[in-house]
Image (cartoon, coloured by chain):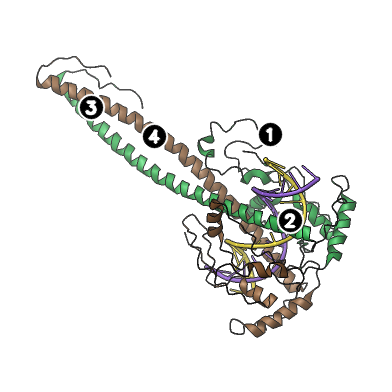
Chain colours: A green, B brown, C purple, D yellow
Amino acid sequence: MSVKVKLSERPEAYSEFVKSYIMMSDSRVSSVIQDWAGSYPGQANSLNPTTATNQLSQMDMMPYSQSQGLMRGGSDDRGAEQMMGLSYLPYSSSCLSNTSNAGNHQQSHANTQQDFSSFLMPTLRAPVNKRSISKDSVEYRMRRERNNVAVRKSRDKARRRILLTQQRAMQLQEENQKLQVRIGQLTQELDSLKHILSQRHLQGADGGAAGESSI
Amino acid sequence: MSVKVKLSERPEAYSEFVKSYIMMSDSRVSSVIQDWAGSYPGQANSLNPTTATNQLSQMDMMPYSQSQGLMRGGSDDRGAEQMMGLSYLPYSSSCLSNTSNAGNHQQSHANTQQDFSSFLMPTLRAPVNKRSISKDSVEYRMRRERNNVAVRKSRDKARRRILLTQQRAMQLQEENQKLQVRIGQLTQELDSLKHILSQRHLQGADGGAAGESSI
DNA sequence: CAGTATTGCGCAATCG
DNA sequence: ACGATTGCGCAATACT
């Protein structure tokens, strides 16, 4: 469960900003309707407690997806745009956004950036106490490595999940066809019997009805 | 369908090699199944030596390095491992892998790298004609930007695809239940008719009575 | 507050 | 050469 929703207004835009010092006023507000099972409104969606729908929720699927749905300029808009042919304009190109640690020793940039952010968003959190988030610090590398591991794990999980969903879909489709066939057989058989009965009726009695109900 | 399989033996290892001047003999052949019909072959990946060694060499060495990809089993292995509780060991931690352009201007490295590769792998392709893959070159930035756009587009597409699959699965499951119900009804109806018919038979055969059993 | 899990993003290697 | 994919690490953020 746990409908994840990013509350921040512009998720990555922030970092981009800090990095490039460029403020792009993209008011892209995406809305991914991946919800299928309902609406993942703000967040505390207590509505349809999935109970009814959980027949499927079982799988796993949902926890993911939607999260981003909020206003992440990302996917949706672009999706729509693509549909229309516009799509995927470079974000703001220009600067490199990775911030990453190319070599290892160019904290100059990193620090600058750091300072900048601290200057820009003091309210959100005091980046100060974060003693030198300097790259190359052991602490930093530790965290990064742990996160990398987590990321790989998470992605692997996601891949498996997707795979399972696909397999399930195929399986269901297969089963579906079988059921359809079965229904065809039953219907045919039923028609035969009805026909026979009606014959008997005509022969034996006269106004008998093979009465049955449903469908 | 289309099980995508990377043919090259050492996907990123190559670049790694060139960058770090370290030859690691991982004969790993990654393969990614991109669609539900796929299977993760996993494959011959060498043991996991080196791990301990270069694990730390990372920090200080040259900017570009990274050699994480070493014995990275691949999704599968990790999956299995996770199942068993091992899972997701840091690749080899080692150096930062991004190689990315942290700042913007470090062609020195890039060039070195370039020369080296040209020296090492002349057979594969003459990296020569690739006039200075220098970062910050307009050409480079152009390509990067185009790729970034392509990546976003591709990922968006993937997201939608996944979403559709999920929806389809749910839809199928729903339909499935309906079909099951229908089959139940038909079966029941059929049984009734059969029963009635059998009665008629008996009646018609021995004693001919009009009576019939309800339903 | 710390640690893990997710997710968007850009990079680089490949694929087609 | 060019777009499409995919694994990977980074950073922001969600969740515990």
Residue A187 x %, y %: 30, 34
Helix or strand or loop: what does disc 3 sit on? helix
Residue toward you, A134 or D10: A134
Q: Earlier in the sequence, mark 3 or mark 4?
A: 4
Can you say which quadrant of the picture contains the N terminus of chain A? top right
Helix or strand or loop: what does disc 1 sit on? loop
- Image disc number at residue A44: 1
Q: Which residue is mark 3?
A: B194
Q: Which residue is mark 4?
A: B180
Check the residue under mark 3 and report the chain it is in. Answer: B
Tag in front: 1 or 4: 1
10 Å crowding of disc 1: few (<14), some (14-19), many (20+): few
The amino acid marked with disc number 4 is Gln
- Residue B202's place in the image compared with A56, above or below, is above
Instruction: Tell me the CA gap for discs 4 and 2.
Output: 52 Å
Can you say which quadrant of the picture contains the C terminus of chain A? top left
Residue B200 x %, y %: 17, 21
Residue toward you, B200 or B29: B29
Q: Which residue is mark 2?
A: A143
